[in-house]
Amino acid sequence: MLLLDEITLRLRKAEKLVKDAEKEFRMGFTAYYAMFHAANALILSINEDVRTHRGTIYAVWKNKDRLGLSEDDCSKLSRAFDLREESDYGIFRQISKDEAENVLKDAKDFVEKAKKILKV
């Protein structure tokens, strides 16, 4: 890829982020952070501690049975993380409104499940 192409893509990404911020479109990615905090609460409940987002995801997958989570629950967290990273750092693909809405639904389900598991 030519440097000029990457520069153009990065500028387009910057413009898109400004527009998204103006529309408060980031609901899907705020939803990821809800899942992240719920996952950390679950991890803390088994006396483990993590310091990074990737560490959180790894700990959830590693301890899914102890935490009472299914593979589907773990996949939703991983997918939300990937979309959040793509949204924040990626330049080759735009995240659709449908994807953001799906992450929001997944986040609601994940947080509710975590509350049920933690009896909160």
Image (tube, grey):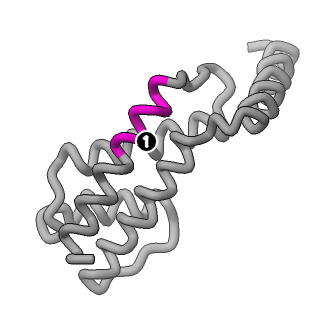
Q: Residue furthest bottom?
A: 47
Horizontal relation, residue 84 to residue 7: left or right: left
Please state which of residues 41 and 61 is positioned toward the viewer in this rendering.
41
- Which quadrant of the figure has residue 21? top right
Residue 113 percent coordinates (x, y) = 23, 59
The magenta stretch spans which residues? 98-106
Residue 16 against residue 24 in the figure, above or below: above
Q: Residues within 10 Å of mark 1 (few under 14, many from 20)?
A: many
Say which residue appears at 45% left-offset and 66% top-offset.
37
Give the labeled residue for mark 1.
104
Q: What secondary structure is marked by label 1?
A: helix
Q: Which image quadrant: the N terminus?
A: top right
Please state which of residues 69 and 103 is positioned toward the viewer in this rendering.
103
Residue 117 against residue 29 in the figure, above or below: below
Say which residue appears at 18% left-offset and 47% top-offset.
71
Residue 31 percent coordinates (x, y) = 48, 49
Please state which of residues 99 and 108 is positioned toward the viewer in this rendering.
108
- Which quadrant of the figure has residue 20? top right
Say which residue appears at 43% left-offset and 74% top-offset.
50
Quick check: is 7 in the magenta stretch? no
Residue 106 percent coordinates (x, y) = 34, 43
Say which residue appears at 29% left-offset and 86% top-offset.
47
Q: What amino acid type is highlighted by mark number 1?
A: Leu
Horizontal relation, residue 74 to residue 49: left or right: left
Q: Which image quadrant: the C terminus?
A: bottom left
Residue 55 percent coordinates (x, y) = 43, 64
Quick check: is 101 in the magenta stretch? yes
Q: Which secondary structure type mostly characterizes the magenta part of the structure?
A: helix
Residue 48 against residue 89 in the figure, above or below: below
Horizontal relation, residue 22 to residue 45: left or right: right
Q: How many marks?
A: 1
